[in-house]
Image: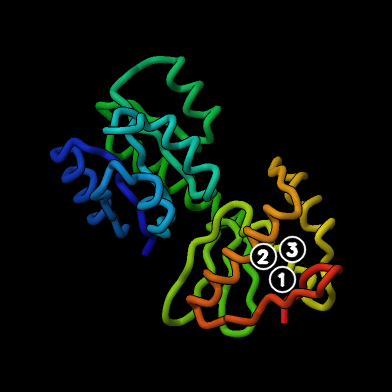
Amino acid sequence: MKKIMIVEDNKVIVEELYNLLKNSNYNPITIADFENAKNEIVKSGADLILLDINIPFLNGQLLLKEIRKEINTPVIMVTSKCNETDEVLAYSFGADDYITKPYNPTILLLKISAILKRCELNSNTISYKDFIFDIGKGIVKNDTSEIVLTKNEIIIFNLLLSNKERIVSKDEIMTDLWNNDEYINENALSVNISRLRAKLAELGYENIIETRKGIGYRII
């Protein structure tokens, strides 16, 4: 069952969306702490996010911009404004689709279904040991738990797993990051590797990334 996160502060609308999604065989989840909305969204492991443009603390467009630094989960922006500028900004910050209030529930469900199907077609996973790495969602999971990776961690882990038969040099990793518009130096790379190791340790893979001093890293 696909998990959909509702990021909306109007309780009446939240209840309506929750019931609509539940009755349509989705698993709806809601946000509890708008002050820390980005962290809650990133950690949720949602398959899709319904993001209202007018929410407390940080408006939806800026929140979307921050989310996109961490994850690539599809986002539908929801707003009461029928404003072309808002639509352009939403897309420029990384929204996958856009719908205005009051919206037709059938149209919203069709948009959700279309995006999820597109994501499934574009989905790319890697299986190794007893875990699955879902690159599209940025999630690593086994039978008991899962972790959510940042954009940099996704790029690094994908490169290491795709070349697990050899050592991957630091230059290769940094080049791959640069090719994805992530400009980091060697010190920043070490920090990213450390954070990735810590997350993988949570799943029980403490020593899966081996350092070859002066050369690079490899998956073991």
Which residue shows up at 72% across the image and 43% down it? Answer: 183
Q: CA distance from mark 1 to mark 2?
A: 6 Å
Residue 63 shown left or right of residue 14 in the figure: right
C-beta proximity under 8 Å, tags 1 and 3: yes
Q: Which amino acid is tagged 1?
A: Leu
Q: What x and y, as percent, mark residue 193?
A: 65, 64
Q: CA–CA distance between discs 1 and 3? A: 6 Å
Determine which residue is flagged by label 2: 157
Q: Label 1, secondary structure: give it.
A: helix
Decide if residue 84 is on the left or right side of residue 219.
Answer: left
Few, some or many residues within 10 Å of mark 1 (<14, 14–19, 20+) = some
Tag 1 residue: 161
The answer to whether the residues at label 2 and label 3 have Cβ atoms under 8 Å apart is yes
Query: At label 2, which amino acid type do we have?
Result: Phe
Which residue ends up furthest to the left in the rendered image? Answer: 12
Q: Residue at x 45, y 15 (%)?
A: 84
Secondary structure found at label 3: helix
Residue at left offset 52%, top offset 50%: 71
Q: Quadrant of residue 76?
A: top left
The answer to whether mark 1 and mark 2 are in CB contact below 8 A is yes
Where residue 67 sits: x, y (%)? 47, 43
Q: Is residue 102 left or right of residue 92?
A: left
